[in-house]
């Protein structure tokens, strides 16, 4: 039966290809959605991820960066520096706001950095300076491209006009781009006085981030201290709360579409071959033989569709950022595998749904002319 | 007569209910001996196909019992039937029912995987059948490239590959022109005579009568004695064959006259250009 099944499928390449392409399109749609979702959810925490701090210290009660504000007394930084196991300390000022660049408005993290800090600034540059002096700003290269600006142009942050001196890479996200300015500028703009927002702490090799955070919490009054990974986790959760629903719905729709197309293709194949299935029954093939045949066809169409979708994803996805630089894509093997598993489930489901049709094929129909 | 291969007792089957009730087969009993070629004839709608479906264990009778060799087929559970069909029964159909994607050889071997030994063991047998049915040269051909006669020979080879004890054929010559029809009849004749395989065959084709050991006449679902005066011999205007007007299914009307045909093939030819045949056979 398996032989019949595959030969019948390949005997009509047009039908096979159109069915597989349909499945591939649906899978590809899901893959793109997933890649956008993954890409964006990585990009949202890119700043924390790329900042070389083991522990983030912030105002007591604050546990996020996204949509949060934190203010701490500046003197807490040297106090933390004296705690055993701490090797480096830097502090940043930070606020969420809208930045104007090239007539467009960008929702942005504004990070105020010290020139001599060990970390906290841009981690990779496309062009120009990485550390802003007063009156200067480092903006994401994607913002510069999309708003038609380059080094030497100005952007507006709150009521300050700042000159672009550097373009940073990997700092753009649809939800939060990161713009770096000098800490003194931001302090003035926020009227923050002697306060800072986050203190970035690096520990010695022998101590875990967990222990270091605990030491800081007990050693310094009224602070919250989180190991980097935990901080990333919380922030991603917070940031994705809003957008994720929509993307989940889209992924679900795409998956349903894949199910429908795969199901329809196989259904059509079965209806089309009903007479041959009836003959197989009349010759003495059992239901399980026939299921196996139909299952194999469904699996083949799905596998082919999946393969095409993966191939499509790997050719198409590198092109998307060229057309739309604001979209960050990330294809994880995990999400591909998940989709593959869904494909297998779909196949099984389709055959299950078809089961009635297959078993109802009446062998007597072979007598019809 | 030796011990019968096939025995049916009091078979009945009806379709529909109340006003629309059709007694397709009504209390039919019959037997067939090893190597016998039995024809079932009768007018269209008389229940021939229904009877054959029940005998071949493709349809459950409403009443009655069927034995093939000593197995009571009508008492088997649904799950036991496939094994019986694969091992004991061969089918030949009017519409051939070949598997479109498989080659001639693959079609012949298709049921072989259902029996002990599988395709490997059946290889030599298939080879032999292909040779005897003159299909050796076409073994790699796909069904759509075959003529009607070749298709039916493939179907017969497929029916024979598992060495069944009985073959059921429903109008195996119905889609063939008279020459190919005759050829197929001769093959089935030799299957019965030379191999001892019982053949039960439904047909409209009166020319098959010569090859048959026995003819059963079905009318309104009942077996009856066939009255000889029901023969009304007419001539097929296309091939010139003698056709019994009573049982003929292929009929056409042209310029107020009725014509009968031995096969659908002849009818199609006639309908394409009736004038040619009416003149050619000297009829006005
Ligand atoms: N599945 C069915 N449902 C309802 N009625 C049926 C069914 N199958 C057959 N019949 C009816 O039963 C009767 C016998 O049908 P059957 O097909 O057995 O006749 P037949 O002798 O084979 O006819 P033909 O020579 O035209 O092939 C007909 O009246 C037909 O309409
Ligand atoms: Mg019939």
Image: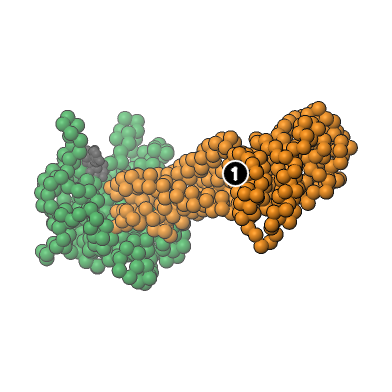
Count of labels in the image: 1
Residue A54 in the image, given as x and y percentages of width and height: 67, 53
Q: Residue at x 37, y 61 (%)?
A: B110
Can residue A4 be seen here? The reply is: yes
Residue at disc 1, secondary structure:
helix
Q: Which chain is green?
A: B
Quadrant for the C terminus of chain B in the image:
top left
Question: Toward the viewer: A68 or A164?
Answer: A68
- Side of A35 relative to B205 (left or right): right
Neighbour tally class for label 1: few under 14, some 14-19, many 20 plus, Cα within 10 Å: some
Q: Which chain is orange?
A: A
Q: Chain of mark 1?
A: A
Residue B70 sits in quarter: bottom left
Residue B19 sits in quarter: top left
- Side of A356 relative to B26 (left or right): right
Residue A267 in the image, given as x and y percentages of width and height: 42, 44
């Amino acid at each position: 039966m398996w032989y019949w099944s595959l030969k019948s499928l390949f005997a009509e390449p047009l039908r096979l290809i159109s069915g597989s392409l349909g499945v591939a399109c649906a899978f590809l749609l899901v893959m793109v959605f997933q890649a956008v979702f993954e890409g964006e959810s990585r990009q949202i925490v890119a700043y924390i991820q790329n900042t070389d701090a083991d522990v983030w210290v912030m105002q007591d009660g604050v546990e996020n960066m996204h949509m949060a504000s934190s203010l701490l007394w500046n003197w807490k930084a040297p106090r933390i520096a004296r705690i055993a196991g701490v090797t480096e300390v830097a502090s940043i000022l930070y606020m969420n706001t809208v930045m104007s660049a090239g007539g467009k408005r960008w929702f942005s993290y504004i990070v105020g950095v010290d020139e001599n800090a060990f970390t906290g600034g841009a981690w990779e540059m496309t062009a120009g300076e990485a550390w802003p002096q007063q009156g200067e700003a480092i903006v994401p290269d994607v913002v510069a491209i999309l708003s038609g600006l380059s080094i030497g142009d100005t952007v507006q942050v709150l009521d300050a006009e700042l000159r672009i001196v550097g373009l940073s890479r990997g700092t753009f996200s649809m939800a939060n781009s990161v713009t770096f300015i000098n800490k003194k500028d931001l302090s003035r703009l926020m009227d923050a006085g002697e306060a800072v927002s986050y203190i970035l702490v690096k520990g010695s090799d022998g101590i875990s981030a967990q222990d270091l955070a605990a030491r800081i919490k007990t050693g310094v009054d009224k602070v919250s201290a989180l190991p980097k990974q935990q901080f990333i986790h919380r922030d991603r959760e917070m940031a994705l709360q809003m957008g994720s629903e929509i993307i989940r719905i889209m992924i679900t729709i795409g998956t349903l579409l894949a199910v429908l197309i795969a199901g329809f293709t196989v259904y059509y194949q079965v209806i089309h071959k009903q007479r041959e299935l009836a003959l197989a029954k009349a010759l003495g093939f059992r239901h399980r033989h026939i299921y196996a045949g139909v299952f194999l066809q469904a699996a083949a169409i799905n596998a082919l569709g999946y393969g095409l979708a993966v191939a499509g994803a790997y050719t198409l996805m590198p092109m998307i950022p060229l057309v739309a630089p604001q979209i960050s894509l990330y294809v994880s093997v995990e999400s591909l595998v998940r989709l593959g598993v869904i494909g297998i489930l779909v196949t099984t489901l389709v055959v299950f749904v078809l089961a009635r049709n297959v078993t109802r094929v009446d062998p007597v129909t072979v007598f019809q002319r | 007569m030796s011990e019968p291969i096939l025995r049916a007792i009091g078979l009945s089957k009806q379709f529909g209910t109340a006003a629309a009730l059709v007694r397709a087969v009504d209390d039919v009993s019959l037997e067939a001996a090893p190597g016998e070629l039995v024809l079932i004839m009768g007018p269209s709608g008389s229940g021939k196909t229904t009877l054959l479906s029940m005998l071949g264990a493709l349809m459950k009778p409403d009443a009655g019992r069927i034995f093939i060799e000593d197995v009571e087929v009508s008492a088997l559970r649904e799950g036991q039937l496939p094994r019986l069909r694969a091992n004991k029964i061969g089918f030949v159909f009017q519409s051939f029912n070949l598997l479109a994607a498989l080659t001639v050889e693959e079609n012949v071997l298709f049921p072989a995987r259902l029996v002990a030994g599988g395709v490997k063991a059946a290889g030599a047998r298939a080879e032999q059948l292909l040779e005897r049915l003159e299909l050796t040269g076409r073994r790699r051909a796909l069904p759509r490239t075959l003529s009607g006669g070749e298709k039916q020979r493939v179907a017969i080879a497929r029916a024979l590959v598992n060495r069944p004890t009985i073959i059921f054929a429903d109008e195996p010559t119905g889609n063939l022109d008279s020459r190919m029809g005759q050829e197929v009849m001769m093959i089935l004749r030799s299957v019965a005579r030379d191999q001892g395989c019982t053949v039960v065959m439904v047909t409209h084709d009166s020319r098959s009568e010569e090859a048959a050991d026995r003819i059963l006449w079905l009318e309104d679902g009942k077996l009856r004695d066939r009255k000889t005066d029901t023969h009304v011999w007419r001539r097929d205007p296309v091939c010139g064959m003698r056709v019994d007007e009573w049982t003929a299914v292929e009929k056409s009307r042209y310029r107020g006259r009725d014509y009968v045909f031995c096969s659908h093939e002849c009818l199609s030819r006639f309908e394409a250009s009736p004038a040619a045949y009416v003149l050619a056979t000297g009829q006005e």
